Every structure is written in C-alpha cells, then in structure tokens.
Amino acid sequence: MKPYSPSGLFPSGRPPRPTYREPHQVSGAGVAAGAAATIAWLVLFGLLGRSLAGYAWWTLLAGGLAWLAAVVLVRFGDRGVAAGIAIVTAGGWSIAAAAVATRWATSGDWPLW
C-alpha cells in the first residue's frame, strides 16, 4: 500500500511564515539625532526673523527644507532620522502657527502680511 500523501487542499500543518527585513531600520538613536538636528535648524532659522512675521516665514521655509531632507532620507537613508525630522518640524510649525494665531486674536490684524 502507498503511504498517504495530502493533496494540499487541506494543509496539515502551519505554513512557514515569511520573514521581512527592513532595509533601513528605525532606531531610537536615529530619531533622536534627527530631532536634535532639526531643533537646531529651526532655531537658527527662527532667529533670522526680526518680527513675528519674519519668524513665521523663516520657520516655514526651514521646515520645508527639512521635510525635503526627510523625504530623501526616507527613500535612500535612515528612516529613523527622517521620522525625527518630521516630528520636530511639525512641532515647530505648530509653535509658529500658535504664535501667529495668538497675535491675530489679540490684535485683530493678520500678522503675516
């Protein structure tokens, strides 16, 4: 008699699970490095503004350049650094937006024009 061989329609065991490897793994050190560099970047650009409008425009420009660097890093470099850049840039933009909104609410005049 022939030994029983399953057809495959009803598998008898668990199939082997695939193992996926991230080409650019995210590490805490990379996120921290990206965050620290972006904080310095935004502060240096923010200090170029002599008024709230100048600060807001310089922060917007610096954040845009930082996000371009993050896009390049996501594709070709360290994704952890890119995540740190994106997180801190969003925070920097939020601070600038809050400052503009506060001035607008207290004075009734849009401060960016």
Image (cartoon, rainbow, N blue to C red):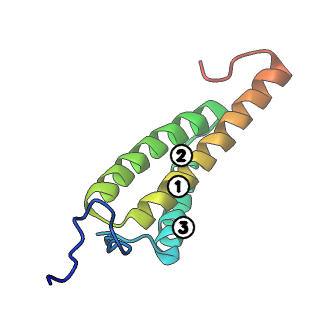
Residue farthest to the left, as pictured: 2
* Secondary element at image label 1: helix
User: Which residue shows up at 35% across the image and 73% down it?
Assistant: 12
What is the C-alpha distance between the residues marked 3 and 2?
19 Å
Please state, as top left, top right, bottom left or bottom right, where the C terminus lies in the image: top right
At numbered mark 2, what does the secondary structure look like: helix, strand or loop?
loop
Of the numbered discs 3 and 1, the one sitting upstream in the chain is 3
| Depth check, front residue: 83 or 113 | 83
Find disc 1 in the rendering and name its residue: 44
Task: Inspect the image, locate mark 1, and give the three-letter code of the amino acid beneath it.
Answer: Leu
* Residue indicated by mark 3: 36
Given contact means CB atoms under 8 Å apart, are the residues at marks 3 and 2 in contact?
Answer: no
Query: x%, y% of residue 80?
Result: 44, 66
Question: Mark 2 — residue?
Answer: 48
14 displayed left or right of 47: left
Residue 16 point in image, percent of width and height: 32, 74
User: Given contact means CB atoms under 8 Å apart, are the residues at marks 2 and 1 in contact?
Assistant: yes
The quadrant where residue 61 appears: top left
Find the residue positioned furthest to the right.
106
Residue type highlighted by circle 3? Ala
Query: Counting residues from the N terminus, which is met first, the one under dot 3 or under dot 2?
Result: 3
